[in-house]
Image (cartoon, rainbow, N blue to C red):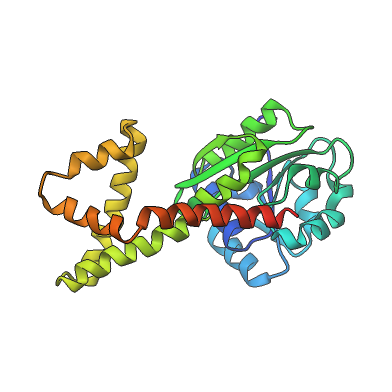
């Protein structure tokens, strides 16, 4: 399926669904007139219609019937109920993309009619600013072209890679939940600067840009983070003093454990 001229539908317009809709429409990959969304919560639909210019409805069937690609952006706990209500309208020419955390392809596919093409994706909230980190994995009926279309959709709002499904829990723990680990880091770094006399706004700008800059150095230089750290840490300098404190308080272990614990929760949701 080529995405040119195709229509995209979202079932669920919560924080993640809305972030993806706004990001995708902003990218220009889909015209807002070719984007449909449905939800029971009408205020979110009204906001999307007004600010993104998309088509909205409280009836999921309307979204499915009018869409070539249907994104299931609902919580895992209600996914089965939602699928049951739309599966007769999901014909073989439609591609289904699920972003429900922890729900395996096998469990999604068995709820649909035989032959339904399904791709599973784990994006993150940074889609709002077109900087999402997403991973996709394709179901047994999905083609290589389906996977490429899913990658194109999610690359329109950031970066996207393809992984085997057994790694999706790790992706959930890392990039799916990761922004929530970084926001407190930015806040804490800014707090330290405020303690030393910098005004709050300036501190937040510098802290956030520092995170952006460090991340871009990793992505664009291809160097190991340890090498990049050593570039900044002069002998007996200011940076190594700070690095010692991070090691003393076990910051690296805390981040590792956060990713592992989030991954474990993703596995629990699949049971």
Front-most of 6 and 147? 147
Q: Is residue 200 visible?
A: yes
Q: Quadrant of residue 164?
A: top right
Front-most of 47 and 182? 182
| Residue 11 vertical placement versus 58 (above, below) | above
The residue under the point 28% across, 53% down is 209
Percent across and percent down for residue 58 are 75, 65
The residue under the point 51% across, 49% down is 174
Image label count: 0
Front-most of 129 and 35? 129
Percent across and percent down for residue 223 are 31, 32
Percent across and percent down for residue 154 are 56, 42
Location of the C terminus (image quadrant): bottom right
Location of the N terminus (image quadrant): top right
Front-most of 218 and 68? 218
Seen as rendered, the residue at the extreme left is 236
The residue under the point 32% across, 49% down is 212
Image position of 23 (left or right of 4): left
Q: Quadrant of residue 2?
A: top right
Q: Quadrant of residue 244?
A: bottom left
The residue under the point 79% across, 55% down is 62
| Residue 128 vertical placement versus 149 (above, below) | below
Seen as rendered, the residue at the extreme front is 248
Percent across and percent down for residue 27 are 49, 44
Image position of 160 (left or right of 108): left
Q: Is residue 3 visible?
A: no
């Amino acid at each position: 399926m080529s995405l040119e001229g195709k229509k995209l539908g979202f079932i669920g317009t919560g924080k993640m669904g809305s972030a993806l809709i706004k990001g995708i429409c902003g990218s220009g990959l889909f015209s807002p007139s070719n984007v449909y969304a449905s939800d029971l919560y009408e205020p979110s639909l009204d906001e999307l219609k007004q600010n993104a210019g998309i088509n909205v409805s409280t009836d999921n069937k309307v979204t499915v019937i009018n869409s070539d690609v249907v994104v299931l952006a609902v919580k895992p706990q209600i996914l089965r109920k939602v699928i049951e209500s739309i599966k007769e309208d999901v014909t073989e020419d439609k591609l289904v993309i699920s972003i429900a955390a922890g729900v395996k392809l096998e469990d999604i596919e068995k709820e649909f009619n035989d032959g339904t093409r399904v791709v599973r994706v784990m994006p993150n909230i940074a889609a709002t600013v077109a900087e999402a980190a997403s991973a996709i994995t394709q179901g047994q009926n999905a083609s290589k072209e389906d996977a490429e279309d899913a990658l194109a959709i999610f690359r329109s709002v950031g970066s996207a890679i393809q992984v085997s499904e057994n790694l999706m829990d790790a992706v959930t723990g890392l990039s799916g939940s990761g922004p929530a680990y970084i926001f407190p880091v930015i806040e804490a770094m800014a707090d330290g600067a405020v303690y030393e006399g910098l005004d709050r706004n300036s501190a937040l700008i510098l802290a956030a840009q520092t995170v952006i800059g460090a991340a871009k150095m990793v992505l664009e230089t291809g160097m190991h983070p340890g090498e990049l750290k050593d570039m900044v840490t002069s002998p007996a300098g200011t940076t190594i003093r700070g690095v010692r404190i991070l090691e003393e308080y076990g910051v690296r272990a805390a981040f590792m454990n956060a990713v592992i614990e989030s991954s474990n929760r993703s596995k629990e949701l699949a049971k």
